[in-house]
Image: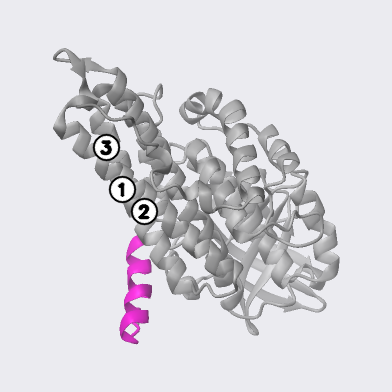
Amino acid sequence: MTTSAAAPLDFLSVDHVLSDEERDIRDTVRAFVRDRVLPGIGDWFDQGRLPRELVGELGRLGVLGMHLEGYGCAGTSATAYGLACLELEAGDSGLRSLVSVQGSLAMFAIHRWGSEEQKHQWLPRMAAGEAIGCFGLTEPDSGSDPGSMRTYARRDGDDWILSGRKMWITNGSTADVAVVWARTEEGVRGFLVPKGTKGFSAHDIHKKLSLRASTTSELVLDEVRLPSSATLPGATSLRGPLSCLNEARFGIVWGAAGAARACLAAAVDYGTTRTQFGKPIGGFQIQQQKLARMALEVNRATLLALHLGRLKDAGRLRPEQVSMGKLGNVDAALDVARTARQVLGANGITLEYPVMRHMANLESVVTYEGTADVHALVIGSALTGIDAFR
């Protein structure tokens, strides 16, 4: 008995609960990824680069800071932004990381905590892709515990003197402005450090086996003198950078579902075209079980992301719910990628197919913006009322 094939990429018909505007945005970003990114991403990953011109194209597409209001930003819903992240990461995690760091970290920090002068100076150019931003929080000895950061800023008359190092910074060496967080006598403060400022340098991290189509750098701040106007006036504690991280994690919830979907699509296509023992391998029970489990995880991850998007649009999303989404969806995406790699056999390890590339990228995604262990502890604390961090 044969049956007509279901839609593996939208098995539960999520498309039907999206608004027309959300579908239009999703389809526009999907077409951009299909036409502009997928033809070259294998080579870019292999070469360890992402073309700079893509930033301007993403700006014209309208996805940079798209969920922010005013200052040249599109002002879309959180759900629409999430759908864009899903489609971008279906292309590559490095592409979605660029957009997340630009919009949800650097631009959000300025939009939420900056002065009007700072907003007008930077946000329109960043939304258009004319200026790139990065976000300096993580340090060589301070990852999951940002409160232990060593980067320090002290007052010197009307100026600030900033010293320290930041590590694993996406967009670092290409950024026109870095949002750098530092300890001060007044609490944790944010500073806008323009490229070319004396004492400020960025050095790329090489020999990466993950997120290769993404610029990752170390930032060095050696007695960098900044005017008082460089501080983000609204942020005086860890609440500042942590609010930005929560924005970025929301995009990862969606992006991971996109990476998983791309792996599932490759496995379904391969399973229905690769013939062994006289029939497509997708006709064997053991392969169908793998495909079914992958489809379950992809569709479940998409539903979870959509639910969190609706909560965010209603102003009801809590940080611990974002942690659950990030933990669940990235873990699920890793399982899907590893299973898809097995379905593709030896072909699964080549860049002619997207699976191994996504699998490698997700090994970074599961760690950045809060490791899986940290998010598990956030959820555990919410369940028990007991903080396990201290």
Q: Which residue is mark 2?
A: 300
Distance CA(mark 2)–CA(mark 3): 14 Å
Numbered range of the magenta stretch: 372-389
Give 154 or 6, whichever is nearer the viewer.
Answer: 6
Distance CA(mark 2)–CA(mark 1): 6 Å
Q: Which residue is mark 1?
A: 296
Kind of residue at badge 1: Leu
Residue 86 is a magenta residue: no
Picture layout, residue 59 above or below residue 380:
above
Picture layout, residue 321 above or below residue 383:
above
Instruction: Name the spot of residue 237 as percent of width and height, x first.
Output: 60, 80
Q: Secondary structure at mark 3?
A: helix
Q: Residue at x 24, y 26 (%)?
A: 2
Quarter containing the C terminus: bottom left
Kind of residue at badge 2: Arg
Distance CA(mark 1)–CA(mark 3): 9 Å
- Residue 291 bears which disc, if any? 3
Q: Secondary structure at mark 1?
A: helix
Instruction: Name the spot of residue 144 as percent of width and height, x first.
Output: 42, 67
Give 163 or 302, whichever is nearer the viewer.
Answer: 302
Q: Main secondary structure of the magenta part?
A: helix
Instruction: Name the spot of residue 318 as percent of width and height, x first.
Output: 50, 75
Mark 1 and mark 2 in contact (Cβ < 8 Å)? Answer: yes
Image quadrant assignment for residue 114: bottom right
Q: Residue at x 75, y 50 (%)?
A: 127
* Residue 351 in view (yes/no): yes
Kind of residue at badge 3: Leu
Q: Residue at x 40, y 37 (%)?
A: 7
